[in-house]
Amino acid sequence: MKKLYIIILLFNAIVLFSQDVELNLVNAKDEFKWGVKFYNQGLYEKSVFSFEKSLSFNSVDNLTHMWLGRAYYMKGDIEAALKEWSQLSDNGNAPLWLDSSIDIISSDLGVASRLYKASEWVPLYSKDFSRPTSILPLDDGGIIIVSFLSDTVIKMNANGGIVSKFDGGFEPFNRPFDIILDSNDGYIVSEFMGDKVSFVNNLGIKTKSVEPDDIPFAGPQYLTKESDRYFYVSDWGNKRVCKFDMDGNYILSISHDLLKGPAGVLVIGDNIYVADQINKTLLLFDSSGNYIVQGLS
């Protein structure tokens, strides 16, 4: 009888332990989701708190440790970020890109040094941009990054060093989204919250802003060029794509009943390809705005 009683106690203890473990995993997952949400909102302090709380429920989750390092890095605590990532690397749980990032950041801090092969992918991290929405490659190997949340455009050299930053000058950008080169050594920038498309000179100062002649923009996003004659911009709120000449004169709007959420536009030859995020399809138009076909759904 005594032996049976002990067996029952052990069984109950195992069941309770299993329930506690399962509950901890659920709580860890919930806190991880909050951490990612705060991170994407730029709330890095709250993000760190949520990831640390998640690890208090499940301390061996490698993905949470990696995200915690990212949150530390974005809030400016580089040493804490390196500590999290280095533990993953030492245990053999870090992906190759993270190992590369650890070496690069450590080298920048004077902690370590290393020679890098030109063929390696080098991740770029910077507190100078937040929520990048577009990258424009340059002929010299550099890039231009549009930083949506910080309302800035950042020019980097081929090594990832910042060359210059600009915010539009006297009339600052209002949530810039995409950028292309204009025909005068300057840039054309779409402003999602500003509901405009702006021409910017090579000093980063706005020279003018343009809008359609009929209906004002409602969340302009993606830009593309048709040679050096025209450019197109997707207008999310109005479910259309607008065409301008390179001087900023409005030409026409492209719309269709099938176009519900334009989320990308590309010109190939005389054809205009528009990605629809809502319908998850690709629509084809000619350069005059005539609908041709729907495909790749």
Image: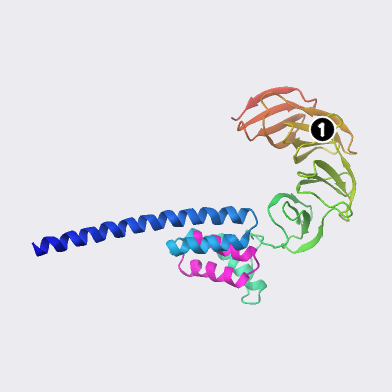
Q: Dot 1, crowdedness within 10 Å: few (<14), some or many (≥20)?
A: many
**How far across and down, in percent of the image, does residue 78 sit?**
62, 70
**Observer-nearest residue: 115 or 218?**
218
Q: How is the image coloured?
A: rainbow
Q: Residue at x 59, y 61 (%)?
A: 46
| Residue 52 drawn above or below residue 230 | below
Name the residue located 81 percent from the left edge and 50 percent from the top edge: 173
Q: In the rendered view, would you say 33 is above or below 72? A: above
Residue 272's spot in the image, x, y percent?
74, 31
**Nearer to the camera, 89 or 129:** 129
In the depicted view, which residue is nearer to us: 207 or 150?
150
- On the rendered structure, is 219 left or right of 210? left
Name which quarter of the figure residue 219 lies in: top right
Identify the main secondary structure in magenta. helix
Residue 152 shows in the view: yes
- Residue 49 at what x, y percent from top left? 55, 63
For the N terminus, the image quarter is bottom left
Task: Give the total number of marks visible in the rendering.
Answer: 1
Residue identified by numbered label 1: 243
From which residue to which does the magenta span run? 64-92
* Secondary element type, mark 1: strand
Q: Residue furthest left?
A: 1
Q: Quadrant of the C terminus?
A: top right
**x and y percent of residue 28 in the render?**
45, 57
Q: Could you tell me the amino acid type at mark 1?
A: Lys
In the visual, does 97 lie left or right of 211?
Answer: left
User: Magenta span has 86?
Assistant: yes
Residue 94 seen in the current view: no
Residues 91 and 54: in front is 54
Question: At 64% from the left edge and 73% from the top edge, which residue is drawn?
Answer: 107
The answer to whether residue 270 is magenta is: no
